[in-house]
């Protein structure tokens, strides 16, 4: 943070006033930096999605997959926002589920709540 203070300069024929920058004190600068960091952190946390939602996880790329991976999160707004969804995300999800929705899970366990949510979304999108 910089403040200014007038400085008077006298020359032989005239008196001029000019403004020179003066650096703010260290505590004020630290307070300003802390306030800026707090506002930034608040803005970032208010803009992030729910931590229980996220993108589709497809696992390692394979030309002939034999199983699919469990989803750790529920579908987020990129997939569920209707006209406001991300078309590329939705198309990628549809491609993955079209190719792999009948495959078993790689760990042999049944579908989780998150897996069911993605399966339901796939069904809803393909029945329209």
Image (cartoon, rainbow, N blue to C red):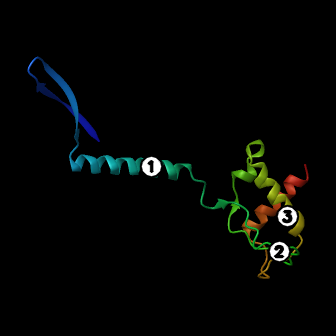
In the rendered structure, which disc, 3 or 2, sits on the residue that comes first in sequence? 2
Q: Is residue 41 left or right of residue 98?
A: left
Per the rendering, the mark at residue 97 is: 3
Q: Distance of mark 1 from mark 3, alpha carbons?
A: 38 Å
Report, in whole angstroms, how far the alpha carbon at label 3 lies from the one at label 2: 14 Å
Which disc number belongs to residue 27? Answer: none
Looking at marks 1 and 3 on the same chain, the residue that comes earlier in the sequence is marked by 1
Q: Is residue 52 above or below residue 11?
A: below
Task: State the SS at label 3.
Answer: helix
Q: Nearer the viewer, residue 23 or 117?
A: 23
Please provide percent x and percent y for residue 13: 10, 17
Residue ID for mark 2: 62
Classify 10 Å Cα crowding around label 1: few (below 14), some (14-19), many (20 and above): few
- Residue holding disc 1: 40
- Viewer-closest of 96 and 104: 96
Q: Residues within 10 Å of mark 2 (few under 14, many from 20)?
A: few
């Amino acid at each position: 943070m910089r403040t200014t203070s007038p400085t008077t300069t006298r020359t032989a024929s005239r008196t001029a006033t000019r403004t020179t920058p003066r650096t703010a004190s260290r505590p004020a600068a630290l307070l300003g930096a802390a306030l800026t960091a707090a506002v930034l952190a608040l803005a970032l946390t208010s803009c992030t999605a729910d931590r229980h939602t996220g993108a589709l996880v497809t696992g390692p790329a394979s030309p002939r997959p034999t199983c699919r991976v469990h989803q750790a999160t529920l579908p987020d707004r990129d997939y569920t926002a209707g006209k406001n969804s991300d078309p590329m995300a939705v198309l990628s999800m549809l491609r993955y589920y079209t190719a792999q929705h009948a495959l078993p899970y790689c760990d042999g366990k049944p579908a989780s709540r998150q897996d069911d949510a993605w399966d339901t979304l796939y069904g809803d999108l393909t029945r329209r």
